[in-house]
Amino acid sequence: MSAEHDLQQIEQANAAGCTPVVFVHGLWLLPSSWERWAAVFAEAGFAPVTPGWPDDPETVAEAKEHPEVFAHKTVGQVADHFADLIGKLERRPAIIGHSFGGLLAQILAGRGLSCASVAIDPAPFQGVLPLPISTLRAAAPVLTNPANIHRAVPLTYDQFRYAFANAVTEEEAKHLYETFSVPAPGAPLFQAAVANFNPWSEVKVDSENPARGPLLIISGEKDHTVPWAIANASFKKQHRNEHAVTEIVEIPNRGHSLTIDNGWREVADTALTFIKRFV
């Protein structure tokens, strides 16, 4: 997604004079995965902003044609990119992120940049210890080859089916794969994998910052990539913040594709209801 597009959205949000909501996508998706969410939040009186990670292509077709643009992106680099964009907003935004976007939402909230945050099936941060077998299997397409730390890695359909689309029909899984799936940088997965052994890790969240703001963690019951054990461990660390509301909710029968599949609206409404309580 072009820098010009991001700045245009920020200018529109500033002109609107209402609370912005910044949507942060995770690995193997693009900002376009939030289009329906943005419409719902705009209708509810918010100013949606859907920035890309640095160098994100405009379309899924373009992303598949030029996978190399995704390589070498690190968690710290992407967090700083979003912090810089948020700094151009005239009002402190709400932030909603999915998967690694959910990790980024928590990093940004920990910097005091959010008025309320929702982390959906968020990737784990330093200090989150559970490592379920399903998570290892979902990450295996990247982590089994150390050279992938410097590469962009696409998922095969079968890998996407396991990691994202295990809780939908075969027909819908194929549609989601064709419509949304793009290559992703390998580096963030390696960073997350060693975060608990690296004192200088970028995969770090200031969960106790008094300015963190209210936080909701949403967990899909059938998520293979970020199962309840990880989401709940993140919640327990965040819940130690005595200055801000921290909540967790589990959405029944949903996998990692819960933001883009046929049940996306239930998740969007859950996030919207939470944010409206505090904005």
Image (tube, rainbow, N blue to C red):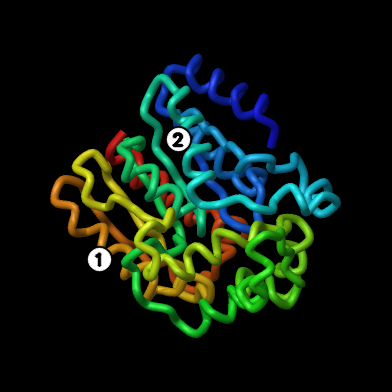
Q: Are marks 1 and 2 in contact (CB under 8 Å)?
A: no
* Label 1 Cα crowd, 10 Å radius (few <14 / some 14-19 / many 20+): some
The quarter in which the N terminus is drawn is: top right
Mark 1 and mark 2 lie on one chain; the one further toward the N terminus is 2
Q: Which of the numbered marks, if any, corresponds to residue 236? A: 1
The picture places residue 258, in percent across and down from the top left corner, at: 55, 62
Q: Is residue 168 visible?
A: no
Q: Secondary structure at mark 2?
A: helix
Q: Which of the numbered marks, if any, corresponds to residue 41? A: none
Question: Gap in Å between the C-alphas at discs 1 and 2?
Answer: 25 Å
The quarter in which the C terminus is drawn is: top left
Instruction: Name the foreground residue: 239 vs 85.
Output: 85
Quadrant in which residue 248 is drawn: bottom left
The picture places residue 127, in percent across and down from the top left corner, at: 31, 66
What residue is rendered at 22% in x and 45% in y? 209
* Label 2 Cα crowd, 10 Å radius (few <14 / some 14-19 / many 20+): some
Quadrant in which residue 145 is drawn: bottom right
**Which residue appears farthest toward the top when viewing the image?**
15
Instruction: Name the foreground residue: 69 vs 63.
Output: 69
What residue is rendered at 54% in x and 24% in y? 10
Q: Is residue 128 visible?
A: yes
Q: Amino acid at mark 2?
A: Ala
What residue is rendered at 66% in x and 48% in y? 30
Which residue is denoted by mark 2 in the rendering? 83
**Which residue appears farthest toward the right when viewing the image?**
65
The picture places residue 53, in percent across and down from the top left corner, at: 60, 43
Q: Is residue 156 above or below residue 88?
A: below
Q: Secondary structure at mark 1?
A: helix
Q: Is residue 187 above or below residue 208?
A: below
